[in-house]
Amino acid sequence: MNRQEKQETVQSLGEQFRSISSAFLLDYKGLKVVDATELRRKVREIEGRYMVVKNSLALRAAKGTRMEALGPYFAGPTAIAFHPKDVVALARLLNEVTRGNAGLSCKAALVEGKVVPPSEIQALASMPSREVMLGRLLFLLRAPLQRFATVLKAPVRDLVLVLKQVKK
């Protein structure tokens, strides 16, 4: 790679790093080509990105971005996986793949700008999906209003019941 290509690579990586708030650093030492291809395909299916990077170029591109916090983890063979929206789905996928493949391990993660060690990535993978979390939130927001409406309807309902009893 000549100097011009390296500069273009750093610029391209820098643009991608500025646009993401969550990413996973993976150690792919011992990963077979077939398994790496399968991993790329699975990440692409959930609309994520997976790329192998040269550490020195990634460190230069990470300067001034949220990815700079992961600097100490850029050692040895490094791959970056990220999803623009659903970090939990990506964590679940990576957890599933690393369980079945000894050649792949997670070095660290960046979730919403905070560094997460590998021990806590399991907890992230076990979280419900974004849609389920939003559904639970909406249920919690709606429940007090629904109870309030029931309380407001109670006097009218009671009056109707009393009138029915008087009629009988």
Image: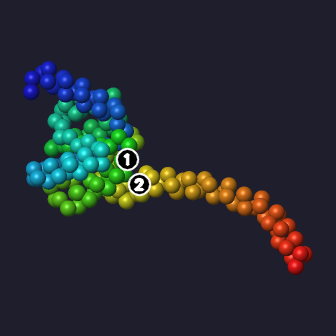
Q: CA distance from mark 2 to mark 1?
A: 8 Å
Q: Amino acid at mark 1?
A: Asp
Q: Is residue 111 visible?
A: yes
Q: Are marks 2 and 1 in contact (CB under 8 Å)?
A: yes
Q: Is residue 21 left or right of residue 52?
A: right
Crowding around mark 1 (Cα neighbors within 10 Å: few <14, some 14 to 19, many 20+) is some
Q: Residue furthest bottom?
A: 168
Residue 124 in the image, given as x and y percentages of width and height:
37, 54
Q: Is residue 107 visible?
A: no
Label ID, residue 129 = 2
Kindly identify which numbered label has been placed on residue 153: none
Disc nearer the start of the sequence (2/1): 1
Q: Is residue 161 left or right of 66 when viewed as pictured? A: right
* Quarter occupied by residue 115: top left
Furthest residue toward front: 167
Q: Is residue 167 above or below residue 93?
A: below
Q: Residue at x 45, y 52 (%)?
A: 131
Task: Kindly identify which residue carries mark 1.
Answer: 86
Quadrant of the image containing the C terminus: bottom right
Residue at position x 77%, y 61% from top? 153
Secondary element at tag 1 = loop
